[in-house]
């Protein structure tokens, strides 16, 4: 399928605008391609363990990591271990888990070291959320490195809203310092706060990138889009309000964009070879 078809129902102006922006971006001296995983590289599925990047997205990432002065990073809300499992990319792909709390860069880097008061808060969080999950069908808790996620994807609309309401209210009283982050069918509570925007800034410095491509689909990706500058390119996957300059329908179209970016970057780094 041609890229124009894959880019779907967006107007031809946007398609041309996106192509032009990708061409400019691909010519940058040092490129960072930072990507959310679920809903961006991988279609959403009910069982999070079964999420996989589309074959086309995987191929595009594999082409990009071979190129000089080009780095690829995944920036996810998943825990690092979980992300490594479902993404299973070459270890040249940098990984950011738990919205920036956990990092797997080129050298082993232990960034998570909770202090006593954070550990106490974590215990309280766990107790309150366990009670809520136990009392409602199809609501479950996932342990995160510095907190918990309350999943309501399989719950009824009513149970889901009730669980969110009770969790937010109880924790306001029991653990007022906990950071709350809302996503699609998930609400996350953590005792340490970072955002995907901070993660992108960290990666930008780490890779010394002169421009950044960022793609994401969820509310938490908006922090990353806001952190982008005029030389960068933000791509929103799917519906919903966004600060990104460009939008496509979902993971299939994201893969088509990444394939075009890989081709443009191959050509740009071939024409202007430089040191890695
Ligand atoms: Mg996502």
Image (spheres, rainbow, N blue to C red):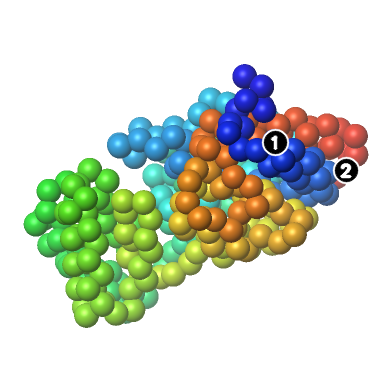
| Residue named by callout 1 | 12
Q: Is residue 199 visible?
A: no
Residue 76 is situated, as x and y percent measured from the top left of the image, at: 47, 50
> Is 232 positioned to the left or the right of 53 in the image?
right
Q: Residue furthest left?
A: 135
Relative depth, front residue between 231 and 55: 231
| Residue named by callout 2 | 274
> Is 82 positioned to the left or the right of 70 in the image?
left
Relative depth, front residue between 102 and 77: 77
User: Which residue is at a point 48% across and 46% down the rendered structure image?
Assistant: 239
In this view, 75 is above or below 68: below
> Is 84 positioned to the left or the right of 235 in the image?
left
Residue 249 is situated, as x and y percent measured from the top left of the image, at: 53, 38
> For the residue carrying disc 1, how many other residues have a C-alpha within 10 Å: few (<14), some (14-19), or many (20+)?
few
Relative depth, front residue between 122 and 223: 223
> For the residue carrying disc 2, how many other residues have a C-alpha within 10 Å: few (<14), some (14-19), or many (20+)?
few
For the C terminus, the quadrant is top right
Compute the Cα span from label 1 to label 2: 34 Å
User: Which residue is at a point 53% across and 30% down the rendered structure image?
Assistant: 252
SS state under label 1: helix
Q: Earlier in the sequence, mark 1 or mark 2?
A: 1
| The image quarter in which residue 120 lies | bottom left
Q: Residue furthest top?
A: 1
């Amino acid at each position: 399928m041609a890229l124009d078809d894959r880019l779907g129902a967006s107007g031809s102006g946007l398609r041309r605008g996106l192509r032009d922006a990708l061409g400019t971006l691909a010519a940058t001296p040092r490129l960072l391609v930072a990507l959310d995983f679920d809903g961006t590289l991988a279609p959403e599925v009910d069982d999070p363990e079964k999420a996989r990047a589309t074959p086309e997205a995987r191929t595009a990432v594999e082409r990009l990591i071979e190129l000089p002065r080009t780095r690829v990073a995944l920036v996810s809300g998943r825990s690092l271990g979980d992300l490594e499992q479902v993404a299973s990319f070459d270890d040249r792909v940098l990984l950011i888990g738990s919205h920036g709390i956990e990092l797997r860069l080129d050298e082993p880097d232990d960034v998570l070291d909770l202090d006593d008061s954070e550990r106490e808060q974590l215990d309280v969080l766990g107790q309150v959320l366990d009670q809520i999950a136990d009392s409602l069908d199809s609501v479950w808790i996932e342990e995160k490195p510095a907190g918990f996620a309350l999943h309501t994807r399989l719950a009824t609309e009513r149970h889901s809203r009730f669980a969110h309401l009770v969790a937010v209210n109880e924790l306001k009283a029991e653990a007022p310092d906990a950071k709350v982050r809302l996503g699609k069918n998930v609400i996350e509570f953590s005792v340490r706060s970072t955002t995907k925007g901070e993660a992108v800034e960290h990666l930008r410095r780490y890779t010394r990138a002169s421009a950044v491509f960022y793609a994401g689909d969820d509310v938490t990706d908006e922090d990353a889009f806001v952190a982008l500058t005029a030389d960068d390119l933000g791509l929103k996957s799917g519906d919903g309000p966004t600060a990104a300059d460009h939008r496509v329908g979902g993971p299939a179209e994201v893969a088509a964009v990444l394939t075009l970016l890989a081709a443009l970057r191959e050509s740009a780094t071939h024409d202007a070879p430089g040191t890695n």
